[in-house]
Structures are given as structure tokens and as C-alpha cells.
Amino acid sequence: MDTNTTQYKTCADVRFRVIAGEGVIIRQEIGEALVVNEVGASILKLLNEGVSTSKLIERIAQEFDVEEERLTLDVHRYLSELESANVVEKVA
Amino acid sequence: MQLSDLTRKFCNENILFSVLLELTYRCNLDCTFCYNDRSLKGTPFRFEHYKKLMEDLLQMGTLNISLSGGEPLAHPDFFRIGALAREMGFVTRVKTNGHALRSRLLERLKKEVDPYNLDLSLHGASAAVHDRQTQVPGSFERLMQNCAEMKAIGMRFRFNMPMTRWNENEISEVFDIVDLFETSINIDPVITSRDNGDKAPLSLSSSEAGMMKLSDLMGKRRKAQALKYGVSENTGNDIVIPQKKHCGSGSSTVTVDPYGNVYPCVQLRRAAGNLHKQSIRQIWEGSEVLDEVRELTVRVKEWTAEQGESCQKIGFCPGTALHETGSATKLYPQAEMRVTILDKKSVREEV
Ligand code: SF4
């Protein structure tokens, strides 16, 4: 089960950039491109910096001025979606 | 938002999304129509220079890097440059003739550079034609063997083929090779003169009959693909960002030659600056040449619209037009031929 201490990172074949406020994700293995919005882009950027889920929630809450409690559920859901899409994986 | 919309946005807003690095003009093949100017002089760009460039590009949000040539593997620092691009999270493509890419070298490329894709040059469907163009006997057989090895280790590749008078009668068989390796091909029907102005390669330009045949074959393939995979339809809810410019030359892309000269793109070779003297950001934000080219691509878009539908469909290249005719808004002979073909086809379809 996911907890706030779980740490994620982008999968080895994933390339990611924040360009003009949009997050561009390329999954090299299957040649797929995904575009995520500003919040999604910030989440991936923080993951790439090695930030834990709890810190990530704290930082996103501050950056976008939303309540941490509401955000927690959304972030967990979002991370598990990214995990099923093979964009991120748990750090062992 | 779709990536295609985003790339239009990058082009409209001058965001440097893709960079093509011509690492060297040296090559292990000797293609008859090669456009590289091997007499060009300057201080060669080495690993430290590319490192600095990639650090700057990372800051600027650039995502795509293509390692090209000549033959990029002939650059002494190729593997270090490729590995660094990977480490920095660039989507890296390698444009190579594939001649050297087998066994240990191929494995090394996959392991150290892990490119998103290889763009392999194919010049025909038989040794007689391919080898005639590369001027290296055995190069066709070698490429086919190397492709089989690439496929076996999961290296993604597709083909690039300049269409010429020599290979235009083998297009159908070329598609068989493409299907055999379950990949795709980009066939460029335009041969240009060399970057130094030498017009000799133009004598190899494909004929009108060859272009007509290509156009028919491509049409058939597109239809077959659409039936196989289903045609995706626009839902009507998508916001489609209109592109203000004809192409991304100097607006979302640049090309860097082996001596650090920066050009708006691979065809439009007006130097916008040199990376030995200025950073890429300084050139990108301050070059008058890039500003002019950005305006030019807006004008070209308007001009092609004025010329009619066929002209908008042929993949007109302002860089080639400038090089071949001295004006970016003038049809060069092969573009003219393609417009004629499309016009003829549309009359045929209407009848
Ligand atoms: S169409 Fe021609 S000028 Fe435009 S980006 Fe492509 S190569 Fe350059």
C-alpha cells in the first residue's frame, strides 16, 4: 500500500521535460508521448529531484495553494495512474 | 493537449524543442549525392563543447537531440556525447548509415546511449542499387544483416531514403524490406545540390514517372494502414492550435555543424552564430538571422496558401528553395514537378 513515505522515480525509458509550463513525457520503449498539465509537470519534476511523496504533497499544496488533506488523495491516485502507465516506479 | 498541438505552440512561440548536431562530416561510405561540404574549416566541436551546449539546452527545456553527420559514429567522442545526452534525459535520435552498427558496437550503443530511435539510410532494395549509391560494395548486405541484429536486441529503427533516378524503380521492393523489419520509412524525393553549391547531385533527381509511382504507392499504403488500425477522428472538443509558420526552421529547431556554427535548420544554412563565441541562449534570443528566418517562415506559409492546395501538400521546403533558386518563395524544379503530379491526380480523382 502507498504511504506518504513511499518514493517514486520515473522509469528508465521515460524522458521528461517541462516546456512552457507543460510537461512532456516520452515513453521510449513504446514510442508514446504524453502531455501533462502544470500540476502533473510539477509532480514529475519533484519526483525527479528525489522528493518523497509527503514532501511532494507539501510542496504542491504550497505552490498551488490547495489544502494538503484534499491533495493527498489526488496525488496518490495520480501516482498510481502513472505507475500503471509505466511512467513512474517505486524506489526500492 | 496533444503533442502535435504542443509542437505547434513551440514553433509559434520560438521555444527550442529539437536540436540536430552534425558531429562530423567524416563517413565510412561515399554516397554519390551527399550534400555535406567536406571542405568546410573551423575549430572542431569536442566533448567539452557539447557538454556545455547540452547543459544550456537542458536549461532552455529542449527535449530532442539528433546526433547526425556525416556518420556520427565517426566522431571520436560519439559515445561520451550520446551517453551524456541520455544521462541528461534528452530524447536522442541517431542518424546513421548503420554500416558499423553490429555486434559489440551495436550492443554498446544500446547500453550506453539507448537512443529513442535510429534513422538508417537505405538507398535501394538490392545490392546493385544500394551499393552503387554508397560506392561501397557489400554495404547493402551488411545493412540488412545489421538490421536483423538490431531487431533481435530490440533497438528501434526506421529507414530514411533519398529517392533518386537509380532507386525509383525499386520503391515497391523497398516497402517489402520496411514491412519485413516491421518499421517505417521516410522517402525524400528531393535531391539538393551540395552545401558548397556544387550542383552535380541534381543529375540523380528522380523522374516525374518515379514521383508519380511513389505518390500512388504511398496513397495505397496509407489506405491499407487506415483500414488496419482504424482512422482516429477528431472529437470536435480538441483545441487545435493553428501554426503561424510554414515550418519550425529557427523557431523550434536549429542545426549545429561540426565547427559550432548554428543554422536555423539542416536545409536553411545561414549561420546565426558560432558556439565557440556565444552560448546557444545568446544566439537563440539575439540572432538577427533567426529573427529574419522566423518572419520568413510566416511569409512562406502565406505564400504557399496563395499558390493553392497542391503546393501546401508537397512538403515545400523554403531552405531548399533558397538554396536552389535564391528565393524562399519560389518553386524549385522538384517541387514544381510534385505540384504538377498532385494537380494531375486531383483531376484524375474528380473525373
Ligand atoms: S521545411 Fe526546409 S526550411 Fe523548413 S525546417 Fe524543414 S528543412 Fe528547414
Image: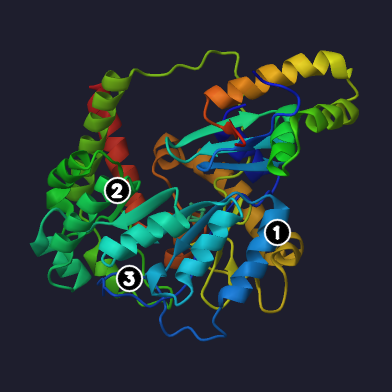
Identify the amino acid type marked 1. Answer: Asp
The residue carrying pointer 3 sits among few (fewer than 14), some (14 to 19) or many (20 or more) residues within 10 Å by Cα, namely some
The circle drawn on residue B317 is none
For marks 2 and 1, give the one nearer the viewer: 2
Instruction: Decide if residue B11 is on the left or right side of residue B72.
Output: right
Marks 2/3: CA distance? 30 Å
Q: Left or right? Give the position of B201 relative to B207.
A: right
Q: Mark 3 falls within which chain?
A: B
Kindly identify the residue that appears in the image at 28 percent across and 51 percent down.
B150
Q: Which residue is mark 2?
A: B153
Count of labels in the image: 3
Task: Using the rendered image of the protein, determine whether residue B101 is visible from the camera's viewpoint.
Answer: no
Mark 3 / mark 1, whichever is N-terminal: 3
Q: Is residue B288 above or below residue A18?
A: below
Secondary structure type for disc 1: helix
Label 3 is placed on what type of residue? Cys
Q: Secondary structure at mark 3?
A: loop
Query: Which one is in front in this view, the residue at disc 3 or the one at disc 1?
Result: 3
Residue B323: x %, y % from top left: 46, 66
Quarter containing the N terminus of chain B: top right
Whole-percent x, y for residue B84 in the image: 56, 62
- Residue B291's disc is 1
Mark 3 sits on what residue? Answer: B34
Q: Is residue B42 visible?
A: yes
Where A88 sits versus B214, above or below? above
* Dot 2 and dot 3 residues touching (CB under 8 Å): no
For the point 50% across and 17% down, the residue is: B234
Crowd band around label 1 with a 10 angstrom C-alpha radius: few (<14), some (14–19), many (20+):
some
Residue B266 placement, left or right of B106: right
Image-quadrant location for residue A2: top right
First in sequence: mark 2 or mark 3?
3
